[in-house]
Each structure stands twice: as structure tokens, then as C-alpha cells.
Image (tube, helix red, strand yellow):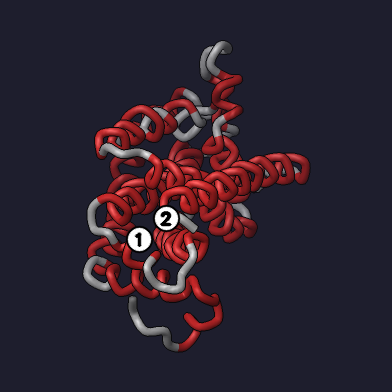
Amino acid sequence: MAALTGPARAIGPAASEFAYWMTHYRRTWRRTIVMSVLNPLLFFLGIGVGLGRLIDRNAAASLGHVSYLAFLAPGLLAAMAMQTGTIESVMTSYLALRTTGSYRAAALTTLSPTDILTGHLLFVTFRIATSSAAFLAVLLAAGLATSPLALLALPVAVLTGLAFAIPFMALGVSVRQEQSVQSSYRFLVMPLYLFSGTYVAVSQLPAVIRPLAYALPLWHGVELCRGLTLGTLTLAGALLHTGYLCAVAGTGLAVARAAYRRQLHD
């Protein structure tokens, strides 16, 4: 484990686990930051020049009289936070327990399973926050936000990412085959892009699908980010969506703590 220096001491025993993941991240941070900026830029350009213009001519009213790009961007912010959260949680926790053995090594020290979970979760939070900040900066630079509340979309994106990352960390240490981890991307994460209001308003989906969409955490994150950037969020909506995401993240944390204790023998 990496030595603790500076602010890392302030987060207690979990700081050494966090420092380990940050040390590991030093080898890849340039690539991940560049991709966090280039991906949304290329996507915005592609959508704005192509599909966005077509939709703007035919469906402006159904989008609340904003451009499709302005409608899409905050949804992508929430979806990107979800994707970052899942990528940085389920596979890395699985590998740390089953392949690299870093969790096992940490468990041989004075760190408790909860410390190991907390330290890794702090790193996941850092990754979601930095990726979301880069995406939001592109969104703001492109002039796609019409409300000064748009800056609040950053903590909302982080909360959305954590609502997925925390339960997926429990999944990562619980499964025994890598195929199970890969299946979680294919059958759980990717379909959420289609049914959570990211690309099209849930009200435009078939009536039979809408109750499922409303139950998905990503829809709540999309609604918060979109409402904040476009200035359409109500107080009741903010409380409902934030409360739902907090409930999912809190429940996931309880499940994850139990899973880590079970696997690492507290």
C-alpha cells in the first residue's frame, strides 16, 4: 500500500486503499482525461450536424422547444456518469478479489473490509467526478445550458454514478466468473441508455414500458441533470429524484458492506 501524505490522512484507515488506487491510476490518467473530453466533443458534433438537425425540424415541440442537442447532452452526462461508475466498480472489484489479489493483500493488514470498500469507493467517486466535470465543461462551452443551475448537474451526476457503482461493487466481489461481470454490462447497463430518457423522453415510449423506466435510477439522474441545465426542474421533482438516488445508493452501500465482510472475513 502506498504511503499516506497530505490530505489522504484525513479520511482515516481507508486512505491507504484510496492511495493504492490513485497510484495505480497514475499510469492511465492522461488517456482517461483525454477521452473524457474528446468523446463528448465528437458526439456533440456528430449529433448536432446530423441527427440533431433532422429532429429539430420535426420534433421541436415534443422536446420543450429546445434543440435536440440541448435535450440530449444532460441525459448523456447522467448516462456517462453511470457508465464510469459501473466500469470503475464491478470489474475492478472482481479483479481485485479474484485475479490481482490486491483486496486479499489489503485484508492482511490492519484494514477492515469496510475500510477496503470505502477506500476503493473514494477512488470511484473521484473518477466519476472528474469524468463528469470534463463532460459538463464541454456542455457549458457548447452553450447547451440555459440555466445558472447547470453547475449543480455535477454533484447530481456523481450521485447518479454512485447509485450504480456501489451496488455493482457488491456484485463484483460476489460473482465467481468474469462472464457474469461482462453480462452485467450487456444485459443491465447498456439497455438503460434506451429506456431511461437519455435519447428520447420517457413520455414518448410505449405506455407498457414507462413504469419500468420510471423505476430505473438512470431516469432519475437524467431528469435531474436535464432539469438543472434547462431550468425546468421543480422543487418537488428535485426532492423526488434526489431521494430516490440516495435510497438506491444507501441500500447498495449496506449490501456492499455485507458482501465485502463476507468475502474478506471481517
Residue type at mark 2 is Leu
Q: Position of residue 46 (x, y in %)?
A: 29, 41
Instruction: Give the mark nearest the N terminus, 1 or 2.
Output: 1
Please name the residue shown 77% across and 46% down the image: 235
On the rendered image, what quadrant is the N terminus found in?
bottom left
Figure quadrant of residue 212: top right
Viewer-proximal residue among 60 and 168: 168
Identify the residue under disc 2: 264
How crowded pointer 2 is (Cα within 10 Å; few <14, some 14-19, many 20+) is rated as: some
The answer to whether mark 1 and mark 2 are in CB contact below 8 A is: yes
Residue type at mark 1 is Tyr
Identify the residue under disc 1: 103
Question: Could you tell me which secondary element the residue under label 1 belongs to?
Answer: helix
Is 87 left or right of 219, judged from the image as shown? left
Please name the residue shown 51% across and 31% down the image: 197
Using the rendered image of the protein, determine whether residue 78 is visible from the camera's viewpoint: no
